[in-house]
Amino acid sequence: MSIQVSFPDGAVRSFERGVSGYDVAKSISEGLARNVLLAKVNGEVWDLSRPITSDATIQFLKWEDTDGKNTFWHSSAHLMAEAVEVLFPGVKFWVGPPVERGFYYDMDLGDRKMTEEDLVALEKKMKELAASKSAFIRKEISKPDAVQYFTEKGDEYKLDLLQNLQDGEITFYTQGNFTDLCRGPHIPNTGLIKAIKLTGLAGAYWKGDEKNKMLTRVYGVTFPSQKELDEYLALLEEAKKRDHRKLGKEMGIFCFDDDVGPGLPLWMPNGAIVIEELEKLAKETEEDADYKRVVTPHIAKESLYITSGHLPYYQDSMYPPMELEGVKYYLKAMNCPHHHKIFDAEQRSYKDLPLRLAEYGTCYRYEQSGELFGLMRVRCLHMNDAHIYCTREQFADEFRAVNDMYLKYFDIFGIDKYVMRLSLHDPAKLGKKYINEPELWLETEAMVRQVLIESNIPFVEVQDEGAFYGPKIDVQIWSTIGREFTLATNQVDFAQGRRFKLSYTNASNESEVPLIIHRAPLGTHERFIGFLLEHYAGKFPVWINPRQVKILPISDKYSDYAKNVYARLRKAGIRSEVDDRSEKIGKKIREAELQRASYMMIVGEKEMEQGEVSLRRQGRGDLGSMTLEMAIERLKKEISDRKDID
Ligand SMILES: [Zn+2]
Ligand SMILES: [Zn+2]
């Protein structure tokens, strides 16, 4: 008996019934068989050894694939549990899922405690067990047999999990001497796990409920090669040095205060300068692109958010309402509804379109205190927002212009790795998950795709993840050390216009609903500045650096000249400070470098006599003496070009 197996490229081949994914891979090439971890059979991720018994589509997954990594890490959690059982006999296990980078397993060690030293021993034991290359063996098991197994083992946690499973859908996985209740899938064998690092130890309440017992959670990360682990550890080290919370404090960018409240950053003078520069850039760019600026209040009546649909659907993310004159008011969580009202404030004709309304809008969102994280997750945010109201005919050009703006910003900030993620609708869910406008969906999706292709922007398409009201484009960027950030979302909207009864008169004097583009290329100040701190390791380019110049007199004798230099720089619009402490010049230079000043101007006898400064560039050393005029010209050029001279 044979079955038909179809491949992603459309090819179809016959195989013996019961053939495994591994055999299919091997029939293609030995190399492929060595590198694949899993098979996606009819869209479901399977163990490579599982027999395929009917016609199927197949796709192979490797370490490079998200499902490949997650399964690799989850399988590593099984390996860790096996090692724990050797070192802590009688341990009971709860769950061991993969996380963003690695995995954890929650366990009950009874009255024993795990220490950092135990982690070292555990790591060693895992390596030993991995070397035996035990296969992960899947076994279907009846519910009574499964219950019996864990009753005998005395693991009430697994028995709890079993309660919610149906007979006939239960599987065990065994590798070496360890058997776990698990739906799988897993990688073929433990030998693929070549590099192991246990990264942390924590307490975690059973089922996340503080009324329950505290379990021990062990975190780890594994890789298919030592090289990848080394790279990962180096990245962690570098990321720690560039941690935006640490740099933000050292550089006087932002702080938090208990009395102000969690998640509400206070921007200090240096942070305010960075914000000002970003806004100046955005305003200039938007003015060039013919945007109009608006300003809207931070609160609005409940009815506005009922119209927009934020209430009740988004209520969990909003601050609770306050009541005034018998009416409920909410802090604004998004700027869109306010902008729609400005569109609606005047009679609009097709001649007024496209209308682009921009605002650095302040929004407030309720994030749970456990979710707050530095500037990355906050409760008050300033968004580089704008809404573009246009006709269907104008849409492609408008969308292209928005993309060009993103690219311009990427160039200015030296972001060379980015991907746009285009989320589409699912026709089967029109009228439920997606607004029922089949033609508009297809038309706008096609236009967006076309524009992305034409602008040479790398993008991936994802089915069934669009917003309710239109296709969505998430922009992911990578910092210089290769960490990924989701910067902003760019959305096409054909629902809000209707909800707000927005209209314009078209050329044949009929009323039409405009399309709306939501865009925020610089995201929020909070997240973007957090990103920039890591990206530049705090060493901002001159134009955006709060400390552009530090003036360092060699001794007190030159303080007056230093103050003259300061006055001249100030007049030229260059930010500077004088360090006139009676310290050795070497120390002053070191400190200025640490403060990440872009330039140092050192002044002594010769400089004073000749109207010069001795110029020093952060991280690059001495640039020699030059007239103050020349130094100012150099800085002014870097600032106005928003580009450092190499
Ligand atoms: Zn498992
Ligand atoms: Zn919006």
Image (cartoon, rainbow, N blue to C red):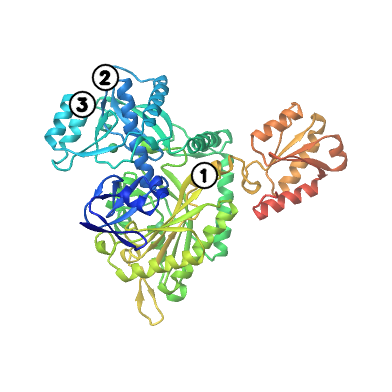
The reply, left or right, for residue 312 in relation to residue 72 is: left
**Which sits earlier in the primary sequence, circle 3 or circle 2?**
2
Question: In this picture, is 57 found above or below 615?
Answer: below
Q: Which amino acid does label 2 sit on?
A: Gly
Question: In this picture, is 98 found above or below 328?
Answer: above
Ligand 1 visible in quadrant: top left
* Mark 1 surroundings within 10 Å by alpha-carbon count, few (fewer than 14), some (14 through 19), many (20 or more): few
> Disc 1 marks which residue?
482
> Disc 2 marks which residue?
110
SS under mark 1: loop
Q: Residue at x 77, y 37 (%)?
A: 602
**Which sits earlier in the primary sequence, circle 1 or circle 3?**
3
Residue 593: x percent and y percent? 67, 35
Can see residue 261? Answer: no
Question: In this picture, is 415 found above or below 530?
Answer: below
> Disc 3 marks which residue?
155
* Image quarter in which the N terminus is found: bottom left
Residue 571: x percent and y percent? 73, 48
Residue 147: x percent and y percent? 14, 31
Q: Residue furthest top?
A: 111
